[in-house]
Amino acid sequence: MNPIADLDILADTTAPVSSAPDAQSEIDQPRTVAASAEAPNGRRVFIETYGCQMNVADSELVASILGGEGYGLAATEDEADVVLINTCAIREKAEDRVRGRLARFRAQKTKRLAAGEKDLTIGVLGCMAERLRTKLLDQEKLVDIVAGPDAYRDLPNLLASADETGQAAVNVHLSREETYADLTPVRYDSNGVSAFVSIMRGCDNMCAFCVVPFTRGRERSRPVTSILSECAQLVEAGYKEVTVLGQNVNSYRVDADGHAVDFAELLYRISLLSPELRIRYSTSHPKDCSDELLHVHRERPTVCDFIHLPVQHGNTDVLKRMRRTYSREQYLELIDRARAIVPDIAFSTDIIAGFCGETDAEHADTISLMEQVRYDHAFMFAYSERPDTYAARKYSDDVPEAVKKARLSEIITLQNAVSLEKNRQRIGRREVVLVEGTSKRSDEQLRGRTDSNHMVVFDRPAGLAKGDYALVEVTDCSSATLHGTFVSATTLEDAAHPSAAV
Ligand code: SF4
């Protein structure tokens, strides 16, 4: 699942590194809520989210479910009656971090109770909830409630039960049907410009390194009408960009209007909603990225010419061990086909260094594939084993840490050089930028993304605001950011092509 990365969800890894702007923070930094004005039932919930965009979208659903029961949102844990951590089981580091936060909340609860203050109910949600419930509940006694990714509707009951009985309440049942299709997420983490829209849940792919199929269950697609209605509401509310989310969006399929609607058709239908709504998606498994989908990119100007297409490795034998179901050659053919259909398309990817049994020659194939594809961004990880996965059961995690590190370092060095080179090629071009807000470095500058998902920073002109489109001429760059000069305000409709050259 991003520039963000993520999102083909990744194996547990150490020290993930991204060449994409802001990606690191999107993976590693917790997202927290902004307080809501009302708390009709007198109780406020603090939600902290770790992991990928799917988790952020899930937390927005949780806020919606609890809001419907009269809970308000708290901006800090100190103001809260309930703290919920929405977790990520993808990487060990994320688990360790969540554990640390839970211990801190537990200490706060103990302190409050000793001082005769209001109680603090502590809950853990999401992927890690399912995987570590026994440990968190019975051994470490860190939490009061545990709710898996398909049990969010049960949260009000779980909270009531924990309060009434003083006993831990748990629901980690994985559903084959739940898509939360009828819920309108509360966009508490949003900048008011871009929003995530979840179109499916779970994954059936069973990649050898990945824990997602065990923590999020089987694949389910959300009905078309519910997705279109959510996107239409976002347009109505002034949003200018949606990122459509699924563990593998290319598997999206539902029966609607008497025929099967696949992901290409869904994207096409979303693109008919507004000529000013940019559409991105994540993540796209290479094995079923169709020509129809590529033609939607080509024909619909609001569908961004950018695909996060995780390759994971450059050697066919390793891909086989990873159970990715495509070969190096098939992946490269797909890249060529995509570039033939959509000439200016940009790619990002995920790469794992040091997977089980990886030899020097196999690693060299990853390097040569990167040199051939020349990704705009990449999310690069050293492999580390996750419990219960196919790789953990069948293979030995036998590449020494020092070798993994050295190979990862080589991959990062190459990607940084390629990102810089590709950014330099954009100097002199005029790009359509959707303004996301003020630059982190200066209030006098704005930042936003191009159609190709490159971050651009430029001096703030009078009258331009967050959510506006601007034509910006690229004048300079680093490997992560483009710098530019404002040319004019524009609309997507007015811009002949989002990445038109001067
Ligand atoms: S199992 Fe599913 S979520 Fe995990 S890497 Fe494979 S396609 Fe992505």
Image: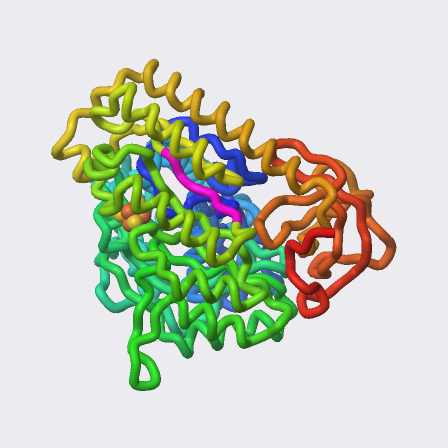
Q: Where is residue 23 in the image (x, y as percent from the top left)?
A: 52, 40
In the image, taking residue 470 as reference, residue 104 lies left or right, namely left
Name the quadrant containing residue 411.
top left
Q: Where is residue 305 in the image (x, y as percent from the top left)?
A: 54, 55
Q: Which of 165 and 473 is in front in this view?
A: 473
In the figure, 311 relative to 231: above or below? Answer: above
Name the quadrant containing residue 191.
bottom right
Q: Give the range drawn in magenta.
A: 346-351
Can residue 7 be seen here? The reply is: yes
In the figure, 280 relative to 263: above or below? Answer: above
Kindly identify the residue that appears in the image at 33 percent across and 28 percent down. 365
In the image, taking residue 226 as reference, residue 419 lies left or right, namely right
In the figure, 42 relative to 452: above or below? Answer: below
Confirm whether the magenta stretch covers residue 484.
no
Q: Which of 87 and 252 is in front in this view?
A: 252
Kindly identify the residue that appears in the image at 64 percent across and 58 percent down. 498
Of all residues, the one furthest to the bottom in this rendering is: 258
